[in-house]
C-alpha cells in the first residue's frame, strides 16, 4: 500500500455519535447531565440507545461485533487488583468512575427508558458502554464536539510507530490514511496519542513497556516539600513563599492562587516537571538576583542557571520528592515476580505490571536528577 493511500472512508452517517440539534431530547437530557471529564459515558449513552434499537439501528452489525466484556479496563478490576496498583492517582480515578456509574444509574437512569426502547439501563450496562467508548472513540470533529465511534477504523491497534492516521474531510467523512508505504502482511497501526500508562490503562485497558511518555503524578505540597528538603539535606536554605515578588512568580506558575494547578508530573522526556523546578527555585532564593531572571518561563528551563546554592537545593529537593513517591510503592520487582505465576488473575497481573512500570519511571527520574547534580559538580559520581 503506497504512502497516502486511503484504506477506509466513513461518511458522516456511519460514525456513531450524537448531536445536540438532532438527537432524541431525552437522550440529550441524560447526556448533558454527565460531567465533561467523563465524556465516554456521554457517548456511551448514545451507544446504548443504538444498541436498544436492535436490527433497526444502522449500527446493529457493528454493535453486535463489539466486545461483550472489557477485562483489562480497571473499572472492572477486582478489589484485590485495585489494591495491587499501589498508585493513588489511578485508584482515585477508578473510584470516581465507579461511583459515577452507580449514582448516575440510580439517580438519573432509573425509570427513564424512552431513549432506550423501554429497556432499563443499569450501572453494569453503563460501565460496558463507558469502557467501549473510552477505548474506541475518536475526536474527529474538534476538541469541543462529541467524540465518535468509527466502525472498522477502531480495529487498528496502537503503536507510537504508526503506519496510518485518521483524517477528517470537509464533507464530514473520516478516512484511514497510510503515513508510509505498508508491506503485505504488515499490521495496520494507529497512534492513539502520546499517552502515559495511566490513561492507557484507564481508557484502553493496557500498558506499554517501554513507554517514553509515561510519567508519575504528585502534588506540589509544602508538607511534601519540607519532608523532601529534610531527606535531601537542603534545610540550610529557607523555603519562603510569602514575599510579594515570589507570590507573583508562583501565581504565574499556577502553584498558588485561585487558578492554581498543583499536579506535578515526573518522568517522560523531561527530568522533572519544569514548574516544580521553577517553583523550588523561587521559593528557595533569598532575593531576585539569585534567580538570574524574573521571567517564569525562563525559570522553567533546565538550561537556565540560577545561583548554585539555589539550583543545587532545587534539584536535590525534587529528587527527594521522587524518592518519597517511590517509597510509597512498598513492593519490589523481585517480589512481584515471585508472587506472579500462571494462576495469577489477569487483572492482578495487569496491576502489578502497571506499578512496576511506575517504579521504573521514578527510579529513572532519580537517576536523571543525579546526573544533573554530578554534571554541575554538586555530587560525586558513584563508581561500582
Image (cartoon, helix red, strand yellow):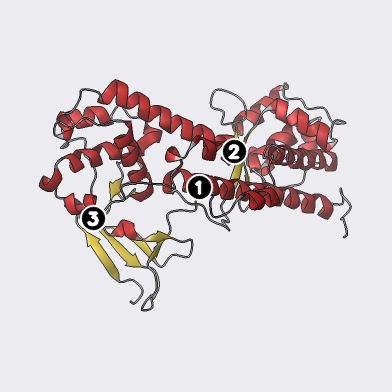
Label 2 close to label 3 by CB (< 8 Å)? no
Label 3 close to label 1 by CB (< 8 Å)? no
| Relative side of 82 to 225, left or right | left
Quarter-of-image position of residue 20: top left
Observer able to see residue 302: no
Total marks in image: 3
Label 1 close to label 2 by CB (< 8 Å)? no
Q: Position of residue 291 (x, y in %)?
A: 76, 38
Query: Given the current orientation, which residue lies at the most extreme front position?
Result: 343
Q: Position of residue 118 (x, y in %)?
A: 14, 31
Nearest to the observer: residue 330 or residue 9: 330
User: Which residue is under mark 2?
Assistant: 87
Q: Nearer the viewer, mark 2 or mark 3?
A: 2
244, above or below 179, in the image: above
Marks 2 and 3, how far apart at CA: 43 Å
Nearest to the observer: residue 68 or residue 98: 68
Residue at the (39%, 28%) spot, across then down: 100
Residue at the (56%, 52%) spot, across then down: 213
Mark 3 neighbour density, 10 Å: few (under 14) some (14–19) many (20 or more): few
Q: Position of residue 284 (x, y in %)?
A: 78, 32
Nearest to the observer: residue 15 or residue 359: 359
Observer able to see residue 257: yes
Nearest to the observer: residue 113 or residue 285: 113
295, above or below 138, in the image: above
103, above or below 281, in the image: above
Marks 1 and 2, how far apart at CA: 19 Å
Quarter-of-image position of residue 375: bottom right
Query: Mark 2 or 3 closer to N-term?
Result: 2
User: Which residue is under mark 1?
Assistant: 345
User: Which residue is under mark 3?
Assistant: 170
Query: Mark 3 or 1 closer to N-term?
Result: 3
Amino acid at each position: 500500500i503506497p504512502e497516502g493511500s486511503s484504506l477506509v472512508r466513513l461518511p458522516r452517517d456511519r460514525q456513531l455519535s450524537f448531536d445536540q440539534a438532532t438527537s432524541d431530547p431525552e437522550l440529550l437530557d441524560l447526556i448533558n447531565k454527565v460531567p465533561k471529564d467523563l465524556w465516554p459515558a456521554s457517548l456511551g449513552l448514545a451507544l446504548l440507545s443504538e444498541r436498544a434499537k436492535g436490527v433497526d439501528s444502522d449500527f446493529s452489525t457493528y454493535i453486535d461485533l463489539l466486545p461483550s466484556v472489557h477485562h483489562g479496563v480497571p473499572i472492572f478490576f477486582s478489589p484485590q487488583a485495585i489494591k495491587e496498583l499501589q498508585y493513588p492517582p489511578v485508584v482515585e480515578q477508578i473510584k470516581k468512575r465507579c461511583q459515577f456509574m452507580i449514582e448516575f444509574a440510580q439517580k438519573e437512569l432509573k425509570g427513564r427508558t424512552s431513549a432506550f426502547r423501554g429497556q432499563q439501563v443499569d450501572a453494569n450496562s453503563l460501565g460496558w458502554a463507558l469502557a467501549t467508548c473510552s477505548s474506541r472513540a475518536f475526536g474527529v470533529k474538534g476538541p469541543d464536539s462529541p467524540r465518535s465511534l468509527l466502525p472498522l477504523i477502531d480495529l487498528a491497534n496502537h503503536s507510537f510507530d504508526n503506519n496510518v492516521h485518521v483524517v477528517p474531510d470537509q464533507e464530514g467523512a473520516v478516512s484511514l490514511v497510510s503515513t508510509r508505504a505498508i508491506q503485505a502482511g504488515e499490521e495496520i497501526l494507529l497512534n492513539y496519542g502520546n499517552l502515559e500508562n495511566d490513561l492507557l490503562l484507564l481508557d484502553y485497558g493496557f500498558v506499554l513497556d517501554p513507554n517514553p511518555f509515561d510519567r508519575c503524578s504528585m502534588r506540589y505540597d509544602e508538607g511534601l516539600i519540607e519532608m523532601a528538603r529534610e531527606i535531601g539535606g537542603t534545610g540550610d536554605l529557607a523555603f519562603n513563599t510569602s514575599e510579594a515578588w515570589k507570590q507573583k512568580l508562583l501565581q504565574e506558575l499556577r502553584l498558588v492562587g485561585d487558578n492554581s494547578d498543583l499536579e506535578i508530573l515526573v518522568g517522560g522526556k523531561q527530568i522533572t516537571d519544569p514548574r516544580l523546578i521553577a517553583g523550588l527555585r523561587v521559593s528557595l532564593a533569598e532575593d531576585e538576583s539569585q534567580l538570574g531572571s524574573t521571567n517564569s518561563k525562563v525559570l522553567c528551563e533546565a538550561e537556565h542557571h540560577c545561583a548554585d546554592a539555589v539550583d543545587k537545593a532545587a534539584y536535590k529537593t525534587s529528587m527527594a520528592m521522587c524518592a518519597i513517591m517511590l517509597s510509597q510503592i512498598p513492593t519490589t520487582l523481585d517480589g512481584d515476580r515471585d508472587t506472579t505465576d500462571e494462576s495469577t488473575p489477569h487483572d492482578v497481573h495487569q496491576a502489578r505490571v502497571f506499578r512496576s512500570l511506575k517504579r521504573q519511571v521514578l527510579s529513572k527520574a532519580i537517576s536523571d536528577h543525579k546526573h544533573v547534580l554530578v554534571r554541575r559538580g554538586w555530587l560525586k559520581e558513584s563508581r561500582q
